[in-house]
Image: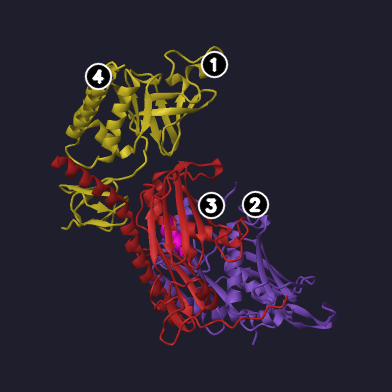
Chain colours: A yellow, B red, C purple
Amino acid sequence: MPVFYENKQLVTPGDLVAENDYISGENTYKENNKIYATRVGLFGHEDKRVYVVALKAFYLPAVGDTIIGKVLEVTLGGWVVDIRAPYVAMLRASDALERSFKPQKDDLPSIFDVGDTLVAKIVAYDRTRDPLLTVLERGLGKIARGQVIEITPTKIPRVIGKQGSMVNTIKQETGCQITIGQNGRILVSGKSPEDERLAIMAIRKIEEEAHTSGLTDRVTEMLRKQKDEKSKKEVNENVPKET
Amino acid sequence: MKTSQKKPEKLIDEKGIRSDGRKLDEMRQVKIEVGALSNADGSAYIEMGKNKILAAVYGPREIHPKHQALPDRAALRCRYHMAPFSVQERKSPAPSRREQELSKVIRESLEPSIFSEYYPRTAIDLFIEVLQADGGTRCAGITAASLALADAGIPMRDLVSACAAGKVEGRLVLDLNDVEDKGGEADMPVAYMPNYNAITLLQMDGMLTGEEFETVLNMGLEGCKQISQLQKEALKSKYTAVKEDEKEESEEEAAE
Amino acid sequence: MTSVMAAKVRQKRIAQMIAHGKRLDGRSPTDYREVQIEPGLIERAEGSARVRLGKTEVLVGVKIESGEPFTDTPNEGVLTVNAELVPLASPTFEPGPPDENSVELARVVDRGIRESKAIILEDLCVDPGKKVFVVFVDVYVLNHDGNLIDASSIAALAALMNAKMSNYEVKEGEIKIKPGYKLLPMRNHPIAVTFAKIGDKIVVDPWLDEEQVMDARLTMAVEKDGKICAMQKGGNGYFTTQQILEASKIAQEKAAELRKLVVKE
């Protein structure tokens, strides 16, 4: 019962990856007992399941996901939000206000205006309509400070790490607050722009080297090295100049 | 102004070698680069002989105007366009009827390959720009477009590969260039999806007997199979280059 | 925007029957609907013909006027084919500039005529580089009940065959019309045969409901000696190599049959 590729081998759409008794996992499809890849990526198989880890894929909304969005439009009953997906999302006023929405009294733009970024959760999504958001939970709401960066959504799990090990490492080493959106957007908020820059550097490194191992250690090492260099530089600057 | 007709040179010599030095069943040189454009969601650039063609994909994305939305799948929209300087005599930038027809048949050649049913009510916009033309532009365009779709991360059943075959000065040939297309007896572009043994584009102008047609069709499909190999290599090389750089980097780091 | 989508149940029925080799209107997979040809009904046009293929109705008018040749073919007259999907022909046709369907229809009909050398363009040359005759073939779809390509191709051929060219002489570089006329010289009689693929079966001359169920269409134009002079695959699906080769043989047969209706020996 053959599998035609080894783990971590690069496959392209249409490549025949397995035949007969296998189950078609993500980024594959089965037709006439043959399983083919649907995207460019790294082949993998676990027991009877074959799958492809896509090198490039866009985000598709899923109920329960935490995402970072940008307000595109204010409408009569809420907001239209860009969530970096094939569909725009809707945030209704009732999912943003603790109490009931009173159109005469509540001024929607003063709550969220065009251009604001926010952390939200997807509460509903199906084939017939655009995703619906809410900001009525802890940790959700308008982003007031920090920087939002974008990475390929497929690398998000790597940034999080096993049980959060990777992202916690970055938080510890840089002292930054990091909020991860499943849609490939990450909010980094630190005590200084310098701390934020370090955290962002770490995230970019993870994005580039996502497929390698020992990454957590290398990221920790890089961050410590950067901090060392920084403090060395500060010491030099504090030495009074010779007159 | 009276122009005297220039007697056309022979397109194929007695030894069966064509005016550009190729054998009858030889394809032109192909060069492919995937991901050439940074703004598009996916892109690919192809050179096939003197053809220079760029394909780019945006999507799946919100569809405008809304009435074009399909309730159960993504709408694939395609624009094939030739730059004014792409041909010998400057071509007006306005879309010609030929470009309209080619936009349609190219779209229809790629539609069976994408899982459009995964993204209802969205648009997948495909743009093919011919920067320089020398015969067989729709085939090279389809080849590049299929790669651009893959580069955009759009799930596909298979890549679509395209190539033309035909008849020139009585001989059956593969991959006609512009002078061969204009001076020959038949030109037949074909696009193919190997996994389904599916022919997704087939056109012919010229004259072929039933037997000639069968031979030319098979020649074209052989050409498509060669193109398919080149497409896969092009997709892989974009990523193996990155992987090798990092392999070197991590080996260097380990050595330190 | 209105549509003429047959109900899903009906579509399923059509597909099921075709899987068993039967069609909803009783035809076999290689039967054409009834063809009626009425030539010469538009007197103002140099040539004309109306064709009814089942309920599909197409009117073609041919106008022959003097004009200038293209710079790269100074010794040749000009053939130009245009098609209009007139809004009254179907609730799905909207007024406006030609859309991709009407452009494709025109170009496929054109290809059959041009590639079969049905009209020898050099015959239309009056004064090389300066004056030639331009043959305008205008396809006017009056009722769309499927297979516009074949209906249009038969009508175009029939219209060209009764197209009259006035006798003329050239005086001081101008064309002066003389009394009398001759028929436009035709050297070939191309006929288009269109197939629809439904499931994994192919049928000839699809009517509207079959077109809505089909996943792809294939047209082959065949000239008088049985050579194929044009091909066009349309639709979002595909054909296998076997189906295409099978279609080419059926096309040669059907084209010969249909030609007899247009070209009386």
Q: Which residue does the numbered mark 4 point to in the structure image? A: A235
Other residues around mark 3 within 10 Å, as few (<14) / some (14–19) / many (≥20): few
Pinpoint the chain carrying mark 4.
Answer: A
Highlighted magenta segment, given as a residue range: B138-145
Splitting the image into 4 quarters, where does residue B217 fall?
bottom left
Q: Which residue does the numbered mark 2 point to in the structure image? A: C94
Foreground residue, A204 or B158?
A204
Instruction: Determine whether the residue tagged by mark 2 lies in a helix, strand or loop.
Output: loop
- The picture places residue A203, in percent across and down from the top left corner, at 29, 32
- Quote the CA–CA distance across marks 4 and 1: 58 Å
Q: Which residue does the numbered mark 1 point to in the structure image? A: A103
> Is any atom of residue B42 visible in this view?
yes
Hey, what amino acid is under mark 4? Val
C221 inside magenta stretch: no
- Quote the CA–CA distance across marks 2 and 1: 42 Å
Pinpoint the chain carrying mark 2.
Answer: C
